[in-house]
Image (tube, rainbow, N blue to C red):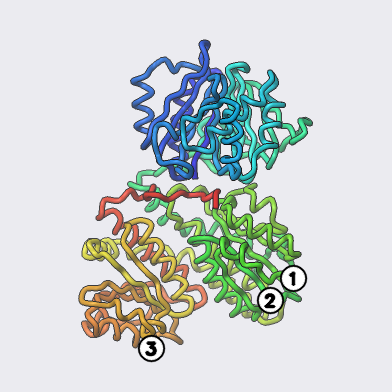
Amino acid sequence: MCGIVGYVGREEAVPVLLQGLYKLEYRGYDSAGVAVLRPEGLKVVKTKGRIKNLEDKVQQVGGMEATCGIGHTRWATHGEPSDVNAHPHISRNGRIAIVHNGIIENYLELREMLTKEGYEMQSQTDTEVVAHLFEHHFKGDMMQALMDTVKDLRGSYALGILSADDPGEIYCTKRDNPLIIGVGEGENLIASDIPAIIQKTKHYIVLEDNQIARITPDQVEVFNAFGQKLEPEVQTVNWDISSAEKGGYEHFMIKEIMEQPKALRDTISPRIEGDLPRLEECGLTDELFHDLRNIHIVACGSALHAGLVGREVIERFARVPVSASVASEFRYRNPIIGKEDLCIVISQSGETADTLAAMREAKKRGARTIAIVNVVSSSAAREADSVLYTWAGPEIAVATTKAYSAQLAALYLVAIKAGLARGTLTEEEGKEYCRKINELPELITEALRTRPQIQYLASLYSNRQSVFFIGRGVDYAAAQEASLKLKEISYIHSEAYAAGELKHGTISLIEDGTLVVAMANDKALYEKTLSNVKSVKARGASVIMVTNEEVEPDPEICDFVVKIPDCDPALSASLSIIPMQLFSYYMGVYRGCDIDKPRNLAKSVTVE
């Protein structure tokens, strides 16, 4: 959530900043702004609403020609979305401009202190407090002022700073919020994520917590919290700009849905050798799984739903107790976890605040940690004991699709590895499951062929106000992700229920015309699920069944059948979710929703 960009070089800064902000739209925002350093001082333009509003306002204002500037997209936390609350924020003397991601937890205490010293607050934000605090500490030395400022801050932040007293320079620092430095030739940048710099450079530095950087057109200097100079590693982006473009699709979401066969293939192929999982390079050795007492999967949102599938599969293959917990609940419930336990955290961005905090809690209690993440060198990847990357490529749409599918594939490999290490799977069984996993990209390609049928179904049901998803076992886990997708994209109320729970209260919500989507892909549970389907159909529900069984639409059972390829029930969530992703997408399209930027949502949730 929120996005930072900064540019210093020899080109006009504003076009670079605006382009960078557009590339960060997927992170979620409700206002935007830029500040540039001109010979007469700082000039700031900011506005509520979309970046296009900002671009229009910049043109109206004029006089923004400069080669050094910072920009920001804000997702409101302290104060409503407004021009005043938008970033950048300016110090009292007008000499300092600051953009900020994160939350300053002690901002009220700092605000009170600064108010007593005569500083007047113009906004409701915690960020304006940082701008005034910086001025309070500034005695002519930017580095010292920044070190003194962050000592007073509690909470999370990524900061980008311009000073009229240090033209041609940008300063930045971070704690528990992502920030990278793009390293170019005669120009350098800062940004919250790689897409904002990729058109300028493929070389970047990941700023670590509490480090401070000074950036000029020809130099990037990185210091530790005590001002000692460091030699940071310069990394190279391994994908090109076309991966972050729509490529002819109307939306990033549909592009990313269609990219799932490749995402799975890229995640799976390097990790299977001789029909067996090879995860030693990821730090996942046989010894790690031998004497486990419990496995704790911790995540948020769609990553948690991948974890629910993972729980089913790992328990089935490795016969070890597995829990899947919401990260924000796990960290506060005094979890029973220790050195005989394994904690698997899942996060597309690797920067999810609650997930990171939960992982740190698990490490503090002695548990071994594994991070399943998509973003290389993210905080979760750096801090976990082991990391298993999902090579899904950049995912721009706020609603995850291909990263979720890649997370499932990674969890399948972990489950097989654990089963083999613990002796609960034979080598031949492990090989057979690996062969089945290798077939998933082709099976997903086949499942994507349901697209015309799904588009038709969405045209029929896009006016519904409430939708229910039901399933058992792995199908229930998949149903929870299907329900979330529909909520995210179409704003239709939806719920997922274990099919066997219907008669314990939920069935009272079923009336004539209620849409129920039934997931039924486990042959061992098919008849029981079918019985539940008949129950809702008898009460007037419209029913879509997603199944790999040979079943035809029957007015007494279901209105429509979406047929997906047959596969092992343990892996079926990878296929059943495909038509449901398409269904959510087209439901949103028919309802006129902002598909890639759903209201109130952010791609990377970096605050609690």
Q: Amino acid at mark 3?
A: Glu
Q: Amino acid at mark 1?
A: Asp
Q: Gap between marks 1 and 3, in whole Å?
A: 38 Å
Q: Secondary structure at mark 3?
A: helix
Q: Which mark is residue 70?
A: none
Q: Which residue: 60% across, 27% down?
A: 117
Marks 1, 3: nearer the viewer: 3
Q: Secondary structure at mark 1?
A: helix
Residue designated by label 1: 286
* First in residue order: circle 1 vs circle 2: 1
Q: Badges 1 and 2: C-beta atoms under 8 Å apart? A: yes
Marks 3, 2: nearer the viewer: 3
* First in residue order: circle 3 vs circle 2: 2
Left or right: 443 with respect to 189?
Answer: left
Q: Gap between marks 3 and 2, in whole Å?
A: 32 Å
Q: Nearer the viewer, residue 221 or 339?
A: 339
Decide if residue 39 is in sight here.
yes
Q: Which mark is residue 527?
A: 3
Q: Badges 3 and 2: C-beta atoms under 8 Å apart? A: no
* First in residue order: circle 1 vs circle 3: 1
Residue designated by label 2: 420
Q: Secondary structure at mark 2?
A: helix
**Residue that lies at the very extreme toward the front in this rendered image:** 116
